[in-house]
Amino acid sequence: MTTMTTTMTTTRMTDGPTTAAPSQTGSSAGTSAGIEPNRAEPAREIGPPAATPRTDGDPTPRPRARGASARVRIMAWLVLVMASGLITIVLVVRQLLLNNIDQQVTRVLAQESQEYAAFAAAGRDRAGSIITEPDELLDLYLGAQYPDEYETLIGVTEGPNGLDASRQAHESMRDVPLSDELLRSIIDTPAGSGSVEIAAGELRWLKVGTRGPAAADTDPVDAWFITGYLVEPSLQETDATLRALTIIGAGALLSGAGICWLVAGQILAPVREVRLAAAALTERDLTHRLPVHGRDDIAALTEQFNAMLDRLERAFRTQREFLDDASHELRTPITIVRGHLELLGDDPVERAEVIRVCTDELDRMSRMVDDLLLLARSEQPDFVTPSWTSIPELSSDIDNKLRSLADRRWILESIGEGEAWIDPQRTTQAVLQLAQNAAAHTEPGSAIRFGSALTEETASFWITDTGPGVRAEHAERIFQRFARGAGEHRAGGAGLGLAIVKAIADAHHGSAHLVSQPGHGATFGLSLPAKPYEEPGAQPPHDEGDRR
C-alpha cells in the first residue's frame, strides 16, 4: 500500500441490511478433459494362434482368446501415465495458488493493521498536534491511505444513533455494500480476525481497537479500525488458470496419444511383418525372408527370425531328403526278401540259400536302422561328452582296434603329443568308421595308414587308403546321408557311415574332410577343437584341474 495525502471522503454507512450470499469459498481444481478410449481393434498375436485341446471328440483346434493388441496397450499406458501426471500437476498447482492467495491476504491485512497501530500509538497529526478524539484519528489515517485492489479500510465509532463508519476503498470495492449489521457482527466478535460471506463472496477482515489519547487502558474501546479483503476475485483467477491448464494439458494428452499411436504403429510394423510371415509359412514354402533395416532391437528380431527360417528350411529339406532316401534304401532289401520268400521251393539247398539271403538283408536293414537312430541322437546336446584326453593313448587304442577290422596292412604313421578336449569314445567310433570305409574300397593286403596330430588349437585324426579314390562330383556330397562313392553298392554300404563321422565332428564343433585324387586313393580326416568350445558370452566349462 502506498501512503499519500488526499482529501478524505467520508461516507456515512446507512446502507440497508445486506443478506449474506451462500458460501462460495473454495475452488474447483478442474477435471481433465475426458478422452473416449479408442475402440480396440481385433487382437493380434505374433505368430499363429495356439490351439486349445478339445475334449468333445472334435480334433479341430480351438483358437485361443486374444487380448488387446500391443499397439493399443502401448497407447493406453502412455495415456494413463500422461493423464496421471496432468491430474497431479493440476492438483499441485491449485494448492500452490490457494496457499499463495492465503499468504497474500494475510500479509496485506497484517501490514495495514500494523501501520494503523503505529499511527494510533503516536496520536499526532503531521503538524505534531495531539489528536484527542478517536474519530479524528481514524479520519486522518484513512484520508492518507490508498488501498490495494480488492481492499477496503473502514473506521467505525460508537455514536448516539448507532455506528458511524468512514470507508476508504479501492475502485474494485466501492460498489460492494457493507451493512451496519455486518460491521456490528465484526465488532462484537471477540476474535481479532475472521471472514464473513457477502454478496460478492468471502471477505476476510482484521480489526484493531482504538481509545482516545487520554483514555486509560481499562476504558472500553469506542473506535475500531477494520481492514477487509475480498478473496473471491483471486479465487476466480485461480479457477481460470486451472481451467486453462487443464485444457492445455488435455490437448497435449490427445496430441501425445495420437503421436504415440502413429509411432507405435511404425515401431511395431516390423513385428507385424514377422507375424504375417510366420502365418504365411508352410512346409512347402520356407523361402520367404524379411528385409532387415537399421541396427535396433527390431532389426535384431528380424535377423533372428530369418535365421530361424533358415534352420527350418534346412530341417524340412533334410527331413524330406531323409524320408525319400530312407524309403528308397529300405525298399530294396524288403523287395529282395519278399521276392525270395515268394519263390521259395521245397529243395533244402534252395531254402538254405533263401534263408541266408533274407538274413543278410535283414541284418543290413538292422544296421541301417541303428545308424539312423545314431544320427537322430546326434542332434541332442549330450551326444558327445568331452573330457581332457591323452592323444597318444587314444591313438594307440585306435590302432589296436584297427588291426582286427580287416585283412589289411595297417600302418601307424603319426601320433600327436598332448591332451585335447574331446570325447574319446565318439572319436574312436568316427575313426573306426573311416577305417571300415577304407577297408570296403581296398583289396586284402592293401596298405591303410592311420595317424593323429595335435596343435594348440586342433586335434586331427586321419585314415589314408590306396583304393580307387573319390571322383570330384562325389566329393562334395560324400558326407551326406545315403551318399555313396564308387563301388560302395558292391560293398553293401547304406551310405550312412560317413554321415555318422560328420555328425560326430559337428557335435565337437569340428569338421570332417576329404582329400582324394581318382585312382590314387583317398584321405578322410577329422579336425576337432583341442580346447573347450565356448558359446558366445559363455564361461569355459572346465579348467586345468579337470585334466586327467
Image (cartoon, grey):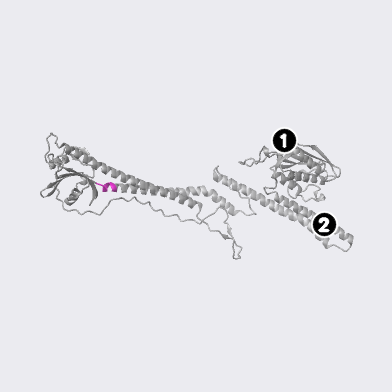
Q: Which dot marks residue 493?
A: none
* Amino acid identity at mark 1: Thr
Residue 14 in the image, given as x and y percentages of width and height: 14, 50
Q: Along the line of sight, which residue is nearer the eye, 331 or 16?
A: 16
Q: How many marks?
A: 2
Q: Along the line of sight, which residue is nearer the eye, 445 or 110?
A: 110
Query: Residue 232 in magenta?
Result: yes
Query: Residue 267 in magenta?
Result: no
Identify the secondary structure beneath mark 2. Answer: helix
Residue lying at the far front in this picture: please name it. 218
Residue 216 in the image, given as x and y percentages of width and height: 14, 41
| CA separation in Å, label 2 and label 1 | 47 Å
Left-right relation of 489 to 166: right
Residue 247 in the image, given as x and y percentages of width and height: 36, 49
Q: Along the line of sight, which residue is nearer the eye, 544 or 535?
A: 544
The quarter holding residue 220 reads: top left
Residue lying at the far top in this picture: please name it. 128
- Residue 145 visible within the image: yes
Chain-order first, disc 2 or disc 1: 2
- Residue 292 visible within the image: no
Identify the secondary structure beneath mark 1. Answer: loop
The stretch of residues the image draws in magenta is 230-235
| Quadrant in which the C terminus appears | top right
Q: What residue did someone put label 2 on?
A: 359
Residue 504 in the image, given as x and y percentages of width and height: 72, 45
Prevailing secondary structure class for the magenta stretch in the rendered image: helix
Q: Which dot marks residue 455?
A: 1
| Quadrant in which the N terminus appears | top left
